[in-house]
Structures are given as C-alpha cells and as structure tokens.
Image (cartoon, rainbow, N blue to C red):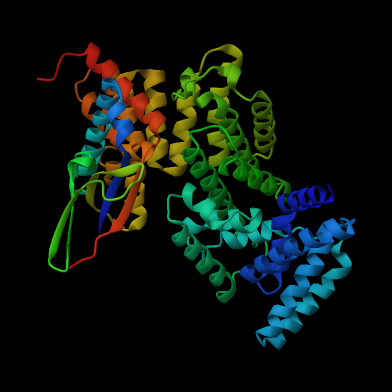
Amino acid sequence: MADVTAAALAERVARESYGRLVAFLAAGARDVPAAEDALADAFAAALQSWPLHGAPANPEGWLVVVARRRLIDGARRRGAAAEAQATLRLLAEEAAAEHPLPDRRLALMFACAHPAIEESVRAPLMLQTILGLDAAAIASAFLVSPATMGQRLSRAKARIRLAGVPFREPAPELWPERIGAVLDAIYAAFSHGWLASGDSRGRNLTEEAVWLGRVAVALAPAEPEAAGLLALMLYAHARRAARRDAAGRFVPLSEQDTAAWDHAAIDEAESRLAAAAKLGRPGRFQLEAAIQSAHAARRRGGVTDWLAIAALYDALLALTGSPVVAVNRAVAVSRARGVEAGLAALDAIAADASLGEFQAYWAARADLEALAGLGAARRSYARAIGLESDPAVRDFLVEKLRAFEAVSAPPP
Amino acid sequence: MQYLMMIHVDEAAMAAARQSDAQAIMAAYGAYTEAMRQAGVWLGGERLHPAANGAIVRNKAGKTSVVNGPYAEAREQLGGYYKIEAADLDAAIAWAARCPGAATGTIEVRPIWPM
C-alpha cells in the first residue's frame, strides 16, 4: 500500500513539477542533459526511499536536494572543479528561496525555441524538457525514427550549453518574435499530436500541448497570443470525440454532432479568447481562435456564419501568407460566395510549387470540382487520397470519389 | 536518396477480405501510386503473389535446395514494394505513413546502398 502511495505521489510530482525542476536545475550551467539525468536519479531514489521512510512533506524540495547532490558529484567526477564551484554557489544562493521553487519554465521554453535551435526540433525539445516525454514517444508523432529524434534532441541540448543559449526571458524589443517562436513550437506539438491521433481515445500529444499552453498563459499573462493559442487548441480539442462516428468513420467538422463536443472546453476557449481580445493586440493565434469560435457557434444557432469566417480568413491570410490558410480560406469563400469563387481562390495559389504533396489543397479542390460537376474532380480526389496518411480520412475520400462517379458521366 | 519501402501484410486477412473492401484497397493503392508519380518520387514498385507461391532457394556447398515459401514463418509477409527517390529518411517515412498498407500492416523503409 505504501508502495502504491509513494509511486503515485512520485508520478504526480513528475507530472506537475518535472519541467519546473529541470528548468531550475539546468539554469545555472545551462546543462539540460545533466539536469535531466540528475532528476531521473532523484526520482529513482524517491521510489526507493519514500515507501520505506514515508513521503516528504515537500516532495519537490526533496527531489531538488538529491538531484543537486548528483549534479555536483557529476561535475566533480568530470574534474570540472570550477564548474562544480559555480554550480554549488548558484544553487546555494537559491537554497534559501526554495519554498516555493522559482518557476523558470518560461525561460526554459525561450531557450528551447531560441533562434540558435533548429526550428523542427523546438517542439520535441519542449515536450522532453518541460514534460519529460521520451524520444521514442515524440518520434512517432513527428514521423521520424526514434534514433533520429534522440540524436536531434541531444544535439539541440549540446547546442544550448555550447552556444550559450540564455535561460531568461528576452528583452522587450525581442519579445514579440521570441514569444512567437515559443507559441509556434507549442502549436507544432499540438498539430503533430492531432494528426497522429485520429483515434480519439487515450492520452496523446494534443493534451501535452494544451498543458504547455496553460503553462505559457500562466507565466506570460500579458501576452494575448498565448491566450489565443490556448483558446485555439481548446476549440479543436473540444471536438476530439466528434471526429469519428460510432463505426470509426471520419466525420468532417461541418457534419459533426455538436452534442458530442466538449462544451466545458469550448466555454473555456471562449473566455480565454475574450480575455486575449481585451488586451487589444490581435495576432495570428487570436484570429485562428476566432475562426474556431465562429465554427463553435453552430452549437447554439445550428448554422455557420461563413461570411464572417471568410472575412477572418482574409485577415489571417494577409497576416501569414500561409498556403494552408489560403486553402482553408478558399473553402470558406466557396461556402460564403459560391463554388466558382472558391475555385478561383484555389487557382490563385495553384502555381505554388509546394502543392505537389499538399493533401489539403487537393482535397479542397476535389470537393469544389465535384460540386461544380467538373470531371477533374476524379483526378483531384485521387491525389488527395494518395497523399492522405489517416486511414479513416482516406476511406472518407474514397467514398466521396465513388459518390461523385455515381452521379457524373463515365470518363471518356 | 533512394529508398525501398517493403510492404509487409497479413496475407490471410487480405485473402479473406470482401470484394468491395479489396476494391477499395486497390483504389487506395492506385491513388497512392499516382500521388507519388505526380510528386516525382516514384521509381518503381510491384505487388507480389502470396509467399506460398514462391520458392526459397539456397546453394550450400554445391548442393542446391529448393523449398516452398514463405521464407519466414510470420503473420505478415512481404506483399509488395515501392522504390522511391526521397530527399532524406524523414521524407521517405512521410511517404511510408501514407501507404495504404501502413494502416493494416507494416512498412519497412530501407535506404538503398548506392553501387
């Protein structure tokens, strides 16, 4: 019984405090791997000691003391006497202020999303250092091999130490750009989790990303884009159960049963977005959240205001110039102003060389061509099907292609 | 770089599939192949007959032996392959994830040793 309690406590502390402890331990020497190793040792020691001697009143403090001892031992063993002295001094200075432990997770997030760190590894780095996820779990969602992900993470951590990436919040003039990189990384974690989890059951990266979003909002309360990002993720997360029907088939947003949405999550998203808007500095994530808010409004009135959504996409496209936004805008335009207008909007981006492997473009194009009765829909559906990796979405598109072929003339 | 994507599938499940399901799978493979051609990554690829229709050949110490397949007693057997040109392993993995066989079986991605 005592075992279970100690293990459960260790797990709870790991969940709530892992990133806080890594950020605290790594800040001095900027040595993330050493901090992670020391913390892993401390957790192992806790699992041995707590069942025998009872859990400490301050589990975080207990772990910090043990991990700090490991860090200092490690520095001594490497013969890095000066380094050990510096670490000792830094940690000793903070010993008095340990209750509560200073929360340096935002500084750690800024280090993970620093311009010196390659963009594609920022989100994985955050998931590992703040939440303690292992490389293999992250690798699957990011569609790379576990060995590759492990190497990328080690290289990035070495770079933090060797390049002297700072563990602090950036100067005011750098803030907008740097917080943007932090939020982009959190959203990348969410998107990868979303795509890797067609199946709505079980814990996945989307929940971890929402957790990171909550940390960012708590630590940067004056940043409206942090709240906007959290709202955006909550709107999407609220629809997770409605993405599949009882038979596991894909259900597009416009056909989802609004009763299956998580209304508490949507309510929270609405209030987060409203709070962000009050700060009077609009941005990409607030606009994307506003679009999701307009979609969510269908739960009350039963209809979707496509004119409003198209207008929000206009603003978002002007801000980002992203081809993904351009495709979504074209779909909204087709609903607001007709299929021809939607196809014209897609034609406007058709020259983009990156579209060859861009599934969303071909799926949107196929739907609009089918609505317009154009035979080209056949080829576009085939491209969209071939580029899709989610089996449920692929089946959904195959069905649409069949339905189109059933009502259209046979190919010449 | 060139990669070989080997599609390992449950032959028994494929043989037992309803005709409509089998047609859907073939349609998905057709679309997948076309998407690879359009993206300029497709170099080749074929579907294979079941392993039991093949032969396992060895030549040990001048003595040739031939036995029936499959080569390995496993639930999944090599059912087909694609040879692709991809920028790196990540790009090859992205294509493997889209393969219809990834949903039911296993795709093994191996870099081709340049000669």
| Residue depicted at 23% across the width and 17% down the height | A405
In front of the other: B18 or A328: B18
Q: Position of residue A363 (x, y in %)?
A: 33, 30
x 31%, y 26%: residue: B17
Q: What x and y, as percent, mark residue A166? A: 63, 69
Q: Position of residue A313 (x, y in %)?
A: 46, 32
Residue at image coords 24%, 60%: B112
Vertical side of A269 occupied by A113: above or below? below
- Above or below A154: residue B23: above
* Left/right of residue B14 with respect to residue A202 in the rendered view: left
Q: Residue furthest left?
A: A412
A354 displayed left or right of A80? left
Q: Residue at x 65, y 34 (%)?
A: A273
Tell me: A129 left or right of A124.
right
Q: Quadrant of the C terminus of chain A?
A: top left
Residue closest to the eye, A31 or A65: A65
Is residue A49 in view?
yes
Q: Nearer the viewer, residue A368 or A343?
A: A368
In the figure, A175 relative to A158: above or below? above
Q: Is residue A362 visible?
A: no
Where residue A401 sits: x, y (%)? 28, 22
